[in-house]
Image (tube, rainbow, N blue to C red):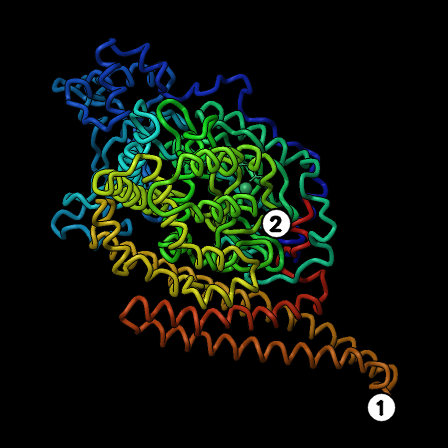
């Protein structure tokens, strides 16, 4: 009997059929999106203006306007062939969720009518009692509701009109990623617009921008199907690294294999129609690893587009007989995947606040946002780190290709020097000479410094890369809203503090605006200097310095997560109205639960695999060897050992590995039983981390040794060299 693996390999090697391109390439950008130009075309001028105001300033939309918009959307959607609509949202599980309703309804005489009015546009009640977050919901109103987010345009996806929405409980608590993201964006807007007034009175709004870089693996689906670990957990729990991996670096930026290229072309064309502005895709460092990145957008839309693209990639990979792995570490000893999130601030007049200006005042504005962002990140480093953790990302963080668990910041030595020089400005009022000097020789030089500010350290967790900060700790599987919400909130808090301090110096110390700004910046630099310089070092040095300076170094999810619910985080989120304490506590519990169940599933899967696949295969091979030894004995009689010593050694080695695997599984199950009775979620997660996770490595070790020993013909699961190199 052939193994599934052998069948798949045979099919792959004999397959000459090409998966045809599935979509027309000629769709216009945004063809499936009801964007601003379409709104303008379909709405009256007055309604269009009201709608823009609502998008811009979050002004609620009244039901009359909602009816008008709904009717315009319906006309457009039906003309495009849509038959259903759904509120499309991002529950805390990280995936996207939908509940499809038909446009068609029956009127009182039983005649079919199309019904989609303001009411349906604005709200939908999915039967969502089994999403995480249930504990937040009142028992007798166990259903949350979704509410339209007019700042992200509706779109048609697989014949369904999708209405980007928020997901809330009836008591108003957020059950999704988007509601807190939007709240954080609004606070950041207020705080940043306030600070901009020092430099440019014309600024009326500041938005956060986000450009994500999505890494992933693309694996042949039939080969992956021979691996229950990949199918159930998204990563390989077993597998010996291939003799060739990424040492030759021949995959990185190399030519994209034909089959992958066809997948990407299809993906690009669909993304285009959905208004996702894909800009680049290329091979990544590891074999079969790729990256896809769009042009950056305002953060809310960028988050939606990332979630939508991940969904689209899953669906599209099916058509091309691939499986997409978003897991952060699908293959041991092979680079993992991240989702670098590039973040900046942009004004309504399209000025990037993290890009130096053309004038000294513009540069001082840049420095204000630059320094305050650094201060915010250092103050809340443990929280920002906590926003990025998960069981899967823990397997990636700290390895040589990925950022470390210490949230260090990289800004480059030239900008470092600028900070040092700024710290040396006189206290109080600056003399005209000193001011001119700083403006010309310190901040005046920033634009030219930045031209040469290459970031040589590609694994720094939080790096300034010329006109944006790049948070690299975020995992490839994560919803980036989680980290962006934290980043927005901590920067908003810091900007409010900055504004208070500058105003105080102007009003009470009678300082001029620029003196007050210089003084406040100087104080901030002094206050963060120690911890900042400590965090700026290379990895090893950072470890010891971080400890000395109190930077956190939480290597695992259960160690990192409590930063969400410490006093400073609760105060931060509550005072800015982004999360209530109750919401934080619930999210904390959900994250712990997710951690526990993810290791639980991996542990069970490994147990089953080892018992049902690996050990029987090893025994099969032992039987082949036994037959061989018997045959040798028949020929050589009592001197058979001379001729069969190696076979006997292999037999013994296999037995040893089988024993180790079996006792490992037994001990792992016992450890699970012990952990499962722990009531406190945090303690239970710690138990999973400390007492169960190590078994995943020790059992694997013996299985991988067997993979190297047992006859390749009978090995049941696709090997790394096949998964990663055959396309
Ligand atoms: P890499 O990090 O691979 O070297 P780049 O430095 O060119 O690549 O930046 C990649 C990402 O940064 C892109 O996704 C791009 O959209 C994003 N990006 C560029 N400018 C901004 C900005 N002002 N705000 C947010 N993201 C940005
Ligand atoms: Mg990058």
Residue 96, given in percent of the width and then of the height, sits at: 36, 40
Residue 119, given in percent of the width and then of the height, sits at: 17, 26
Q: Can residue 308 be seen in this view?
A: no
Tell me if the residue at label 2 has its CB under 8 Å from ligand 1: no
Residue 91, given in percent of the width and then of the height, sits at: 31, 44
> Viewer-nearest of labels 2 and 1?
2
Q: Which residue is drawn at 73% across and 55% down?
A: 244
The residue carrying mark 2 is 223
Looking at the figure, which quarter contains the N terminus? bottom right
Looking at the rendering, which quadrant does residue 117 occupy?
Answer: top left
- Label 1's element? helix
Which one is in front, 478 or 388? 388
Which one is in front, 565 or 305? 565
The residue carrying mark 1 is 638
Q: Residue 316 carries which label?
A: none
Density class for disc 2 (Cα within 10 Å; few <14, some 14-19, many ≥20) is many
- Label 2's element? helix
Density class for disc 1 (Cα within 10 Å; few <14, some 14-19, many ≥20) is few
Q: Which residue is drawn at 87% across and 81% down?
A: 635
Residue 247, given in percent of the width and then of the height, sits at: 72, 53
> Cα distance, mark 2 to mark 1?
46 Å
Whether tag 2 and tag 1 are in contact, CB under 8 A, the answer is no
Q: Which residue is drawn at 53% across and 47% down?
A: 417
Which one is in front, 98 or 147? 147
Q: Is residue 458 visible?
A: yes
Q: In this view, does 35 lie above or below 448?
A: above
Q: In this view, does 245 lie to the left or right of 611?
A: right
């Amino acid at each position: 009997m052939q193994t599934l693996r052998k069948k798949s390999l045979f099919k792959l090697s004999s397959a000459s059929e090409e998966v045809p391109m599935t979509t027309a390439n000629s769709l216009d950008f945004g063809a499936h999106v009801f964007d601003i130009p379409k709104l303008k075309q379909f709405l009256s001028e007055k309604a269009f203006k009201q709608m823009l105001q609502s998008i811009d300033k979050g002004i609620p939309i009244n039901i009359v306007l909602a009816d008008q918009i709904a009717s315009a959307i319906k006309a457009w959607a039906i003309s495009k062939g849509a038959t259903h609509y759904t509120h499309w949202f991002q529950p805390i599980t990280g995936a996207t969720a939908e509940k499809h309703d038909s446009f068609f309804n029956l009127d009182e005489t039983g005649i079919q009518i199309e019904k989609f009015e303001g009411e349906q546009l604005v709200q939908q009640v999915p039967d969502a009692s089994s999403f995480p977050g249930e504990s937040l919901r009142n028992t007798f109103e166990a259903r949350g509701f979704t509410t339209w987010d007019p700042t992200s345009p509706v779109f048609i996806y697989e014949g369904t009109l999708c209405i980007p929405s928020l997901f809330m409980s009836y008591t108003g608590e957020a059950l999704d990623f988007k509601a807190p993201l939007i709240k954080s964006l609004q606070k950041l807007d207020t705080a940043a617009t306030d600070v901009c007034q020092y430099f440019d009175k014309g600024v009326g709004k500041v938005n956060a921008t986000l450009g994500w870089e999505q890494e992933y693996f693309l694996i042949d689906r039939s080969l992956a199907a021979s691996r229950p670990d990949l199918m159930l957990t998204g990563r390989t729990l077993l597998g010996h690294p291939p003799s060739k991996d990424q040492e030759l670096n021949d995959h990185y930026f190399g030519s994209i294999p034909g089959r992958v290229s066809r997948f990407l072309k299809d993906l690009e064309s669909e993304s285009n129609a959905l208004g996702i502005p894909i800009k680049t895709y290329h091979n990544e460092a590891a074999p079969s690893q790729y990256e896809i990145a769009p042009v950056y957008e305002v953060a809310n839309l960028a988050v939606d587009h990332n979630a939508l693209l991940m969904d689209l990639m899953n669906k599209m990979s099916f058509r091309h007989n691939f499986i997409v792995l978003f897991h952060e570490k699908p293959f041991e000893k092979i680079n993992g995947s991240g989702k670098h999130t590039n973040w900046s601030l942009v004004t309504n007049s399209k000025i990037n606040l993290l890009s130096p200006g053309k004038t000294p005042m513009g540069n001082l504005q840049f420095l204000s946002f630059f320094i305050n962002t650094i201060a915010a990140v250092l103050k809340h480093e443990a929280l920002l780190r906590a926003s990025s953790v998960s069981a899967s990302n823990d397997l990636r963080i700290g390895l040589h290709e990925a950022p470390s668990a210490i949230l260090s910041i990289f800004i480059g030595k030239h900008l470092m020097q600028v900070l040092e020089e700024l710290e040396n400005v006189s206290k109080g009022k600056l003399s005209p000479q000193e001011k001119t000097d700083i403006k010309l020789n310190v901040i005046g030089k920033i634009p030219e410094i930045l031209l040469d500010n290459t970031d040589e350290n590609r694994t720094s967790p939080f790096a300034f890369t010329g006109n944006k900060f790049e948070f690299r700790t975020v995992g490839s599987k994560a919803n980036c809203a989680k980290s962006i919400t934290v980043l927005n909130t901590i920067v908003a808090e810091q900007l409010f503090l900055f504004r208070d301090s500058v105003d105080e110096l102007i009003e009470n110390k009678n300082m001029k605006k620029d003196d007050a700004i210089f003084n406040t910046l100087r104080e901030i630099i002094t206050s963060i200097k120690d911890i900042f310089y400590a965090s700026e070092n290379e990895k090893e040095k950072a470890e010891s310095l971080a400890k000395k300076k109190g930077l956190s170094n939480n290597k695992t999810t259960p160690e990192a997560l409590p930063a969400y619910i410490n006093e400073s985080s609760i105060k931060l989120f509550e005072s800015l109205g982004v999360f209530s304490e109750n919401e934080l506590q619930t999210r904390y519990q959900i994250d712990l639960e997710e951690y526990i169940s993810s290791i639980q599933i991996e542990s069970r899967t490994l147990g089953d695999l080892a018992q049902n696949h690996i050990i029987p295969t090893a025994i099969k091979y032992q039987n082949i060897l036994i037959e061989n030894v018997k045959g040798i004995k028949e020929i050589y009689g009592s001197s058979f050992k001379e001729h069969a010593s190696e076979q006997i050694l292999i037999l013994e080695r296999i037995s040893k590995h089988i024993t180790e695997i079996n006792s490992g599984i037994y001990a792992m199950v016992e450890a699970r039983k012990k952990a499962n009775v722990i009531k406190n979620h945090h303690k239970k997660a710690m138990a999973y981390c400390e007492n169960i996770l190590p078994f995943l490595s020790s059992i694997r070790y013996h299985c991988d040794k067997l993979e190297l020993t047992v006859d390749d013909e009978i090995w049941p699961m696709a090997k790394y060299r096949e998964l990663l190199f055959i396309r």
